[in-house]
Image (cartoon, rainbow, N blue to C red):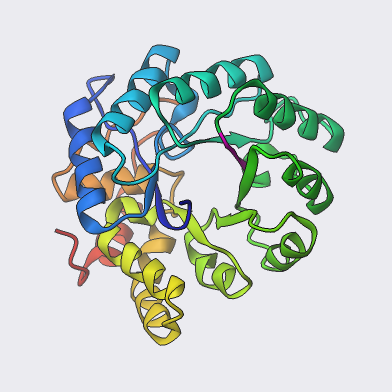
Amino acid sequence: MFRGSITALVTPFKNGAVEEASFVRLLERQIAAGTHGVVPCGTTGEVATLSDDEFQRLIALTVEVCGGRIPVIAGTGTNDTARTIARQRYAQSVGADAGLVIAPYYNRPDQAGIAAHIEAVADASDLPVIVYNVPGRTVTDISPATLARLSAHPRIIGVKDATGEMGRVTRHKLDCRKGFVQLSGDDPSALGHYAHGGAGAISVTSNVAPAQCAAFHQACLDGEWDEARAINARLQALHEALFCAPSPAPAKYALSALGLCEAELRLPLVACDDVARRRVDAAMAGLDLS
């Protein structure tokens, strides 16, 4: 179920409020383009600045619009175990397919604390958990040994790994239970992640180029490596441009240039400067992004 091109959705804002019509339009564009799954309320969705009511509405709306056509992985993770459990239970109640649970940020727990936090979330509901390891944002790293421990839990079914360390994929293959799903959390490393045995990626680029990303991931899944490399090469400049300023500012600018939503963000994030906008424009040129 969880494989291929999985889009970490942006959250459109207009005049400070969530703009639901644009969100639905973006979702339908993803489905029409062949995207294999979506993640609402993740880092790219600016979840840190969403209220609990906004979080709940976006998860419920995503499940409603997707209507079982593609899986929904709700970004339920926070640095508060009780709050994460509440979000995980809510996501289950409205029909999400899994919850994405990040290593606690700011608190900086040790490996025992990280494992206890994620296991407590998995114990608290029947919704599957995908672990999210992104040390660049959380400071703490989920070690391969800790992930192996977590994989023994029947409801902890996979990992989104944004470390960029390709050797981890093989290490996880060796140490985690059979069938444990490995997803890249980084578009530029997705090709290498597949080569080591990964199953897909939770992507930022697919917000902007969903059809191209879906084609790339399908080529990887089908073992069409020449085609996959060719598509990846065409997307490389866009992968890089979308992180030339704090994400998701470049992605939102790109979507605004396509007329799909406003470029608006919530503080402390701010809009791209002119240099970043020109770089995004150049990366989009020549790609069919209709």
Q: Position of residue 64 (x, y in %)?
A: 27, 29
Is residue 90 in view from this perspective? yes
| Rendered-image quadrant of the C terminus | bottom left
Q: Position of residue 221 (x, y in %)?
A: 45, 71
Judge whether residue 8 is colored magenta.
no
Q: Residue at x 28, y 45 (%)?
A: 69
Q: Is residue 133 visible?
A: no
The residue depicted at 25 percent of the width and 60 percent of the height is 281
Q: Residue shown at 56%/15% (left/top)?
A: 86
* Residue 229 drawn above or below residue 272: below
- Between 173 and 23, the one nearer to me in the picture: 173
Q: Which region is colored magenta? A: 128-132
Direction from residue 175 to residue 34 in the image, left or right:
left
Along the horizontal axis of the image, is 94 left or right of 20?
right
User: Magenta segment, principal secondary structure?
Assistant: strand
Q: Position of residue 196 (x, y in %)?
A: 63, 72
Q: Quadrant of residue 80?
A: top right
Residue 282: quadrant of the picture: bottom left
**Residue 68's quadrant in the figure?**
top left
Task: Tell me: residue 28, above or below residue 234.
Answer: above
| Point 30% across, 58% down: residue | 280
Of residues 4 and 114, the one drawn nearer to the viewer in this rendering: 4
Residue 123 image point, x, y percent: 69, 25
Q: Does residue 98 sit above or below 165 in this rendering?
A: above
